[in-house]
Image (cartoon, rainbow, N blue to C red):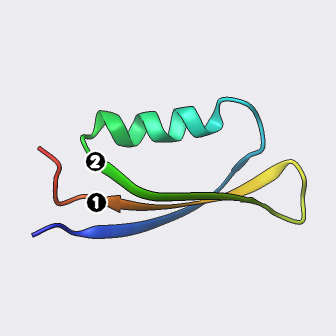
Amino acid sequence: MSRGRVLSALVANRPGVLNRVSGMIRRRGFNIESLTVGPTLDHRVSRMTLLVNVGAAP
């Protein structure tokens, strides 16, 4: 049975941040089911929300 988890984080609005976050999840063997990134009131910060399937991890 798969278990989905929602992760939400405030991240720096800079090139490469999405790659670093997705790489951390990939290295743990989790599958990203859904990913959304949007602005916040502070243009230097974005909100990243992921739905991660943790039941498929090794």
Q: Position of residue 57 (x, y in %)?
A: 17, 48
Tell which circle, 1 or 2, labels the residue nearer the N-terminal end. 2
- Count neighbours of disc 1 (C-alpha within 10 A) and say few if under 14, some if 14 to 19, many if 20 or more: some
Relative horizontal placement of residue 11, taking residue 5 as reference (left or right): right
In the picture, which quadrant includes the N terminus? bottom left
Image quarter (top left, top right, bottom left or bottom right) of the C terminus: top left
Residue under the image location 90 percent in, 58 percent down:
42
Which disc number belongs to residue 5?
A: none
Question: How far apart are the two marked residues, 1 and 2, measured between alpha carbons?
Answer: 6 Å
Residue in the image at 90% along x and 53% along y: 43
Disc number placed over residue 30 in the picture, else none: 2
Above or below, 3 relative to 14: below
Residue at coordinates 22% horizontally, 69% vertically from top-left? 3
Q: Nearer the viewer, residue 35 or 7?
A: 35
Residue at the (64%, 36%) spot, across then down:
17
Splitting the image into 4 quarters, where does residue 54 fall? bottom left
Would residue 55 appear left or right of 48 to someone viewing this image? Answer: left
> Is 17 placed above or below 50 here?
above
**Label 1 sits on what residue type?**
Asn
Amino acid at dot 2 = Phe
| Cβ–Cβ under 8 Å for marks 1 and 2 | yes
Which secondary structure, mark 2? Answer: loop
Judging by the rendered image, the residue that carries numbered circle 1 is 53
Residue 9 placement (x, y as % from top left): 60, 59
